[in-house]
Image (cartoon, rainbow, N blue to C red):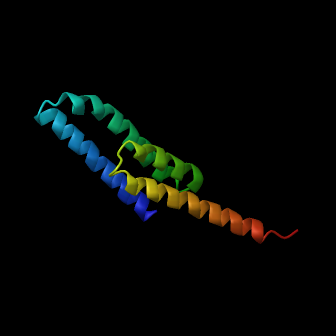
Amino acid sequence: MGLAIGGIIANWLAVLIFYFNASLNYDEASRTLLPFAIIFASIATLGVIVAVNNKNIGGLLTVIGSIFFVPLGLIGVFGGKKLINQANAKSLNERRNFKT
């Protein structure tokens, strides 16, 4: 979970960079990308919040929200993948230890 949270922090720092570029330099590309960056960072943040209850869906949302920020977003992608792997390992252990 820590890697995913670190990725979310990196994503929001990238949003701040887009914001300051758009506001200080009047950069047209940053003004265009800023709404998309906010949307994707919000999706990734929602993924970490959802991961508390459901690691599969939370990990998937974190990966989807972090793809926009590649290469910086790779931190979030790896964190989301780790959440999904944890959920799959837990499910596998439950299936292995199932007794009727």
Would you say residue 88 is visible in this rendering?
A: yes
* Residue occupying the far right of the picture: 100
Is residue 60 rendered to the left or right of residue 10? right
Would you say residue 54 is visible in this rendering?
A: no
* Residue occupying the far left of the picture: 25
Q: Is residue 75 above or below residue 31?
A: below
Is residue 9 rendered to the left or right of residue 86? left
Q: Residue at x 70, y 69 (%)?
A: 93
**Residue 28 is drawn in which quadrant?**
top left
The quadrant in which the C terminus is found is: bottom right
* x then y, percent, for residue 82: 51, 61
* x then y, percent, for residue 47: 48, 48
* Residue occupying the far front of the picture: 71
* x then y, percent, for residue 84: 56, 57
**Residue 33 is drawn in which quadrant?**
top left
Q: Residue at x 21, y 44 (%)?
A: 17
Q: Is residue 95 above or below residue 59?
A: below
Q: Residue at x 43, y 58 (%)?
A: 4
Q: Nearer the viewer, residue 11 or 46?
A: 11
Q: Nearer the viewer, residue 56 or 52?
A: 56
Q: Nearer the viewer, residue 54 or 89?
A: 89
* x then y, percent, for residue 2: 42, 64
Mark count: 0
Q: Is residue 91 above or below residue 32?
A: below
